[in-house]
Image (spheres, grey):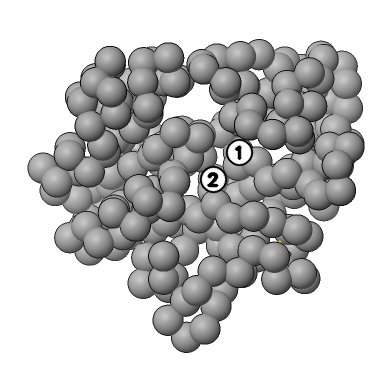
């Protein structure tokens, strides 16, 4: 479960947003799961999987603190100590259903990998991706190659003006798969789409269910985001 992976690329792809590819042979990775990355600070940093091609894993991350600033300075050939894949991902058995993917900001990456996998299985999806502004948008072309894609920006500088909930309200679907900031997840959790799955981001410690740093309220008590999730049925969590 712990791997020393080698960085094969690390580049900026949008405002304060980096794409890092690492080589990690012989690992089976389900969409929606994550890796816990060691930096020089005390805690590891959870990063969701944005794509897998052969033995290369792609992570996208926002440069917002010490750990991610350190990651952004890594060079090709450097190695990283990672734990993973961890957690439970998105349900893939969606044959015959209309699936909508709803992502916001740095919650968009895992939706790319799940969309690719669903596409390979012959399952069509619609994607609604929300960003702050045009400079923050990434992977738009890559998403469009896999099907209908609607982009929203809060400031209206690209795509539709406003939030993902605008286009979501006019789309009929059976299943919603979503990842993004808590306010967005709260909004999409109450959508009339019958089956709704949310990938929740939370502060983490151990990443393996042992420390309780990542608990989230649930109808019967609490759940651990790292080991019970990060993907939950919307009925299983209280946001
Ligand atoms: Fe330790 Fe989830 S991070 S229990």
Name of the residue lying farthest toward the bottom: 220
Say few, some or many: other residues with alpha carbon within 10 Å of mark 1 (under 14 / 14 to 19 / 20 or more): many
Element at label 2? loop
Who's the residue at 38% across and 39% down the image? Answer: 103
> Image height check: is 25 above or below 77?
below
Who's the residue at 28% across and 54% down the image? Answer: 187
| Residue 48 visible in the picture | yes
Say few, some or many: other residues with alpha carbon within 10 Å of mark 2 (under 14 / 14 to 19 / 20 or more): many
- Disc nearer the start of the sequence (2/1): 2
**Horizontal and vertical percent for residue 143?**
38, 24
The residue at which mark 2 appears reads as 31
Give 133 or 224, whichever is nearer the viewer.
133
Who's the residue at 85% across and 32% down the image? Answer: 80
Ligand 1 contact, mark 2 (Cβ < 8 Å): no
| Residue 140 visible in the picture | no
Image quadrant in which the C terminus is located: bottom left
The residue at which mark 1 appears reads as 49
Who's the residue at 20% across and 24% down the image? Answer: 160
Ligand 1 contact, mark 1 (Cβ < 8 Å): no
Which quadrant of the figure has residue 223?
bottom right
Give 191 or 149, whichever is nearer the viewer.
191
Disc assigned to residue 178: none
**Horizontal and vertical percent for residue 128?**
29, 35
In screen coordinates, is 101 left or right of 23?
left
Give 160 or 175, whichever is nearer the viewer.
160
Cβ–Cβ below 8 Å for labels 2 and 1? yes
**Horizontal and vertical percent for residue 106?**
50, 35
> Image height check: is 122 above or below 22?
below
**Horizontal and vertical percent for residue 123?**
32, 41
Element at label 1? loop
């Amino acid at each position: 479960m712990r791997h020393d992976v080698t960085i094969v690329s690390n580049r900026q792809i949008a405002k304060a947003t980096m794409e890092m590819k690492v080589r990690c042979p012989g690992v089976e990775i389900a969409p929606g799961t994550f890796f816990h990355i060691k930096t020089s600070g005390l805690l590891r940093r959870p990063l969701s999987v944005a794509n897998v091609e052969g033995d290369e894993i792609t992570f996208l991350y926002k440069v917002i603190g010490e750990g991610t600033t350190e990651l952004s300075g890594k060079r090709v050939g450097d190695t990283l100590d990672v734990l993973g894949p961890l957690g439970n991902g998105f349900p893939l058995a969606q044959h015959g259903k209309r699936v909508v993917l709803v992502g916001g900001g740095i919650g968009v990456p895992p939706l790319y990998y799940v969309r690719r996998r669903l596409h390979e299985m012959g399952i069509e999806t619609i994607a609604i991706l929300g960003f702050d502004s045009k400079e923050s948008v990434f992977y738009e072309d890559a998403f469009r190659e896999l099907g209908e894609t609607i982009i929203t920006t809060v400031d209206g500088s690209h795509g539709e003006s406003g939030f993902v909930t605008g286009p979501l309200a006019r789309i009929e679907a059976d299943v919603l798969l979503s990842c993004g900031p808590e306010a967005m997840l709260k909004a999409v959790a109450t959508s009339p789409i019958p089956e709704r799955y949310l990938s929740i981001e939370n502060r983490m410690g151990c990443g393996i269910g042992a420390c309780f740093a990542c608990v989230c309220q649930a109808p019967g008590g609490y759940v651990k985001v790292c080991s019970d999730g990060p993907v939950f049925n919307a009925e299983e969590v209280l946001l």
